[in-house]
Image: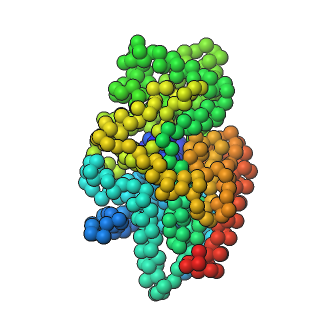
């Protein structure tokens, strides 16, 4: 959703901009992993940052609990063809939602004369129902509640629009968009509420909950290529060996002395490599490491330099987000959603990024026990991700939906939790190029602030991205027209 390290929000430098709609699960996708790199505030990279508020129901599944909370949303209507233009609902995922980013969705909105609205995910950013994120208070944090939030908001916004336009029962044509974890939400929204949207775009959508997600590390090795993979594996072995004899100095060398739990440290080092492939910067990692190997330079020192200068420096990742002491902090903090995403990981989706049994790139110490211990340490006894329940509820990659576009980047480790084959009514596209990563159809590669509107020119094969975008436009155009022609109740 992240590295959807199971990953999430991070402050990123002005040189890089990651729009995680998690964004995902960084762990992301998901989901967005530990670093949520959508923290830039420059207005030129957002269509709007004006905050609006909606009174949302706390528990959609209780007829007795009438509590509500303030949920943040945004609207952008500069391109809207009044009054019958479509409405694009951009789903925010597992991070603070600071505006509607000016990525490829802006291009689509202009093309279709659409209004764009975006709802912040419950608990994240400024949309928390509680003043403290204790384990007890987190019980209303789930994808199921989030989907209901979107449905209720969608109905309310449509009614509000009708009031403004002095109309009674008019229905605009809606289309839902999401990337990473929010890409999964986009697909699931069309699945669960098909009468409320004409279709959905599910970009890098992690629709399959996975307990031990070994394919994640396997894809890192494939994306790295044989030479770079071998160097990364050698570094992992050297670090594993060193940790037994020189733990304190080794962690200090990587600027990670605060990570007292060895598993946290290994996860931090693994994610540092992952982001290069997930977000389209493979050469930033592989070129200096392969050169260091050929020159006979200390590989651990070379990797430490990359981690500190690139992963922490350029990417703006905070070492603290890997510290379980930090994850146990129950204070409501707009800028950090690591604890929140881990709660969803430990209850719903897992995506435990464990090392494969052989030929692993990451340390074998990142195992199932590490993840389960983290869940217990941070949230208490009895936490176990109900992966089977999640997949039964949504269908996993056998999702029985319709009018859902699935897109994935060839180098993205999260694509193996997405739907990678087409089926009737659900086309699936894999965009293949050297630096095609997470959410590439909506962003650019490498993902940076060098361009806006998802300009694909920085991709090693721009035409690969543009061809899929053309297909996306065809599907959106067709499904919007069918929706308008047939009426909602026959969808």
For the residue pair 82 and 484, the one nearer the viewer reads as: 484
For the residue pair 372 and 296, the one nearer the viewer reads as: 372
Task: Indicate the position of residue 36 as horizontal and vertical percent values.
Answer: 45, 46
Task: Indicate the position of residue 81 as horizontal and vertical percent values.
Answer: 58, 76
Total tally of numbered discs in the picture = 0
Report which quarter residue 293 is drawn in: top right
Residue at the image position 49 percent from the left and 26 percent from the top: 364
How is this picture coloured? rainbow
- Vertically, is 85 above or below 183? below
Residue at the image position 39 percent from the left and 17 percent from the top: 247
- Vertically, is 486 above or below 259? below
Q: In this view, does 322 lie to the left or right of 185?
A: left
Q: Would residue 19 be seen by someone viewing this image from the given angle?
A: no
Q: Would residue 277 be seen by someone viewing this image from the given angle?
A: yes
Residue at the image position 63 percent from the left and 53 percent from the top: 407
Report which quarter residue 119 is drawn in: bottom left
Task: Indicate the position of residue 127 as horizontal and vertical percent values.
Answer: 35, 58
Q: In this view, does 237 lie to the left or right of 467?
A: left
Task: Indicate the position of residue 244 as horizontal and vertical percent values.
Answer: 41, 15
- Vertically, is 251 above or below 203? above
Q: Is residue 115 left or right of residue 10?
A: right
Report which quarter residue 424 is drawn in: bottom right
Q: In which quarter of the image is the C terminus?
A: bottom right
- Vertically, is 196 above or below 390? below
């Amino acid at each position: 959703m992240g590295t959807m390290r199971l990953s999430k929000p991070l402050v990123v430098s002005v040189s890089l901009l990651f729009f995680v709609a998690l964004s995902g699960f960084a762990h992301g996708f998901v989901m967005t992993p530990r670093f949520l790199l959508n923290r830039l505030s420059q207005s030129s990279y957002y269509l709007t940052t004006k905050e609006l508020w909606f009174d949302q129901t706390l528990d959609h599944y209780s007829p007795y609990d009438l509590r509500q909370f303030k949920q943040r949303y945004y609207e952008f209507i500069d391109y809207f063809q009044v009054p019958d233009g479509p409405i694009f609902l951009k789903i925010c995922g597992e991070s603070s939602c600071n505006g509607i980013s000016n990525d490829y969705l802006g291009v689509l909105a202009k093309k279709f004369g659409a209004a764009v609205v975006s709802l912040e995910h419950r608990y994240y950013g400024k949309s928390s129902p509680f003043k403290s994120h204790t384990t007890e208070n987190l019980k209303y944090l789930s994808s199921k509640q989030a989907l209901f939030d979107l449905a209720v908001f969608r109905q309310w916004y449509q009614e509000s629009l009708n009031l403004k336009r002095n109309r009674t029962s008019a229905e605009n044509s809606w289309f839902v968009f999401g990337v990473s974890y929010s890409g999964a939400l986009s697909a699931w929204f069309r699945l669960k509420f098909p009468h409320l949207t004409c279709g959905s775009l599910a970009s890098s959508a992690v629709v399959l909950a996975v307990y031990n997600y070994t394919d994640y590390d396997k894809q890192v090795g494939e994306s790295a290529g044989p030479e770079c993979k071998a160097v990364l594996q050698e570094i992992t072995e050297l670090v594993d060996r060193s940790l037994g004899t020189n733990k304190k100095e080794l962690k200090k060398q990587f600027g990670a002395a605060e990570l007292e739990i060895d598993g946290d440290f290994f996860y931090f080092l693994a994610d540092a490599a992952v982001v290069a492939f997930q977000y389209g910067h493979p050469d930033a990692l592989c070129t200096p490491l392969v050169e260091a190997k050929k020159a006979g330079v200390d590989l651990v020192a070379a990797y430490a330099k990359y981690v500190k200068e690139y992963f922490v420096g350029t990417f703006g990742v905070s070492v603290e987000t890997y510290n379980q002491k930090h994850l146990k902090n129950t204070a409501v903090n707009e800028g950090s959603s690591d604890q929140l995403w881990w709660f969803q990981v430990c209850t719903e989706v897992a995506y435990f990024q464990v090392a494969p049994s052989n030929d692993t790139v990451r340390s074998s110490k990142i195992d199932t026990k590490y993840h389960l211990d983290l869940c217990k340490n941070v949230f208490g006894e009895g936490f176990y991700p109900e992966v089977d329940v999640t997949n039964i509820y949504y269908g996993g990659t056998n999702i029985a939906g319709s009018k859902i576009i699935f897109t994935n980047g060839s180098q993205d480790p999260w694509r193996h939790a997405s739907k990678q084959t087409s089926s009737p009514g659900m086309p699936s596209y894999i965009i293949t190029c050297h630096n095609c990563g997470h959410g590439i159809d909506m962003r650019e590669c490498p993902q940076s602030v060098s361009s806006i509107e998802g300009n694909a020119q920085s991709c090693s094969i721009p035409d690969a991205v543009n061809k899929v975008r053309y297909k996306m436009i065809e599907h959106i155009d067709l499904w919007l027209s069918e929706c308008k022609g047939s009426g909602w109740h026959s969808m």
